[in-house]
Image: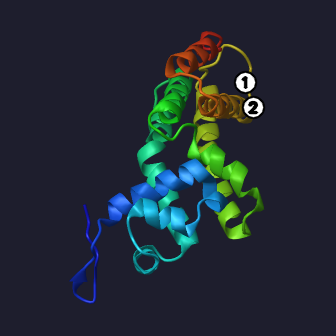
Amino acid sequence: MEKLATRGRPREFDTDEALGEALRVFWMKGYEGASLTDLTEAMGITRPSLYAAFGNKETLFRQALDLYEKDKLAYIGEAVEAPTARAVAETLLIGAVDVATGGECRGCMGVISSVACQSVEPSIRDDVNARAESARQLIIDRIQQAIDDGDFAVPTNAIAMTRYLLALMQGISVQAQSGATRQELMEVAESALLSWPSR
């Protein structure tokens, strides 16, 4: 818990908690849908305090994305360290289910942001897309390594297999937003793994 100081005076609020509340608002409403009033009310701070601590709405959104990646997308880093391609897929799919159903914010903020940010200023859209591409490339590289290691029973294309996994993860997110339960989504993940082409 870090309390930032300005001009020798401690701030009246906890910046980590306030950022967590901002993340929740952006997750539920998207970048454009989250007004400054929504954000300041959820964070329990005034607009001047928001600007002093976090900069403008755009920089606050980027910090919220950083927090989301650190707290909610750690499973992607764990997945690419898994010993087999099937274990990679299992970690990704279960991680997607956990994030999509793990709290009051349903679905995946990455999916919500990439869909909702297509009409916003290019710098925000480009940042969201770059983050998604970075995660995608990590998975492609790991699947390619598995192909090179002879981990698949059939000829496999790393880019196509990654698109398949991401489509499943995005589908899990969309279904969670529509009210699917964790158990129902785990059954989706398990069904996909039944047909995984392991050697």
Residue 100 spot, x, y in % from top left = 53, 34
SS of the residue at dot 1?
A: loop
Give me the disc on residue 160.
2
Residue 167 vs residue 183: left or right? right
User: Residue 142: x, y in percent?
Assistant: 57, 36
112 w.r.t. 149: above or below: below
Q: Residue at x 53, y 76 (%)?
A: 56
Which mark, by number, is residue 48?
none
Q: Are marks 2 and 1 in contact (CB under 8 Å)?
A: yes
Amino acid bearing label 1: Thr
Callout 2: SS: helix
Q: Is residue 138 above or below residue 165?
A: below
The answer to whether 102 appears left or right of 31 in the picture is left
Please say whether residue 10 is visible from this viewpoint: yes
Residue type pointed to by label 2: Ala
Q: Nearer the viewer, mark 2 or mark 1?
A: 2
The quarter of the rendered structure image containing the C terminus is top right
Tag 1 residue: 156
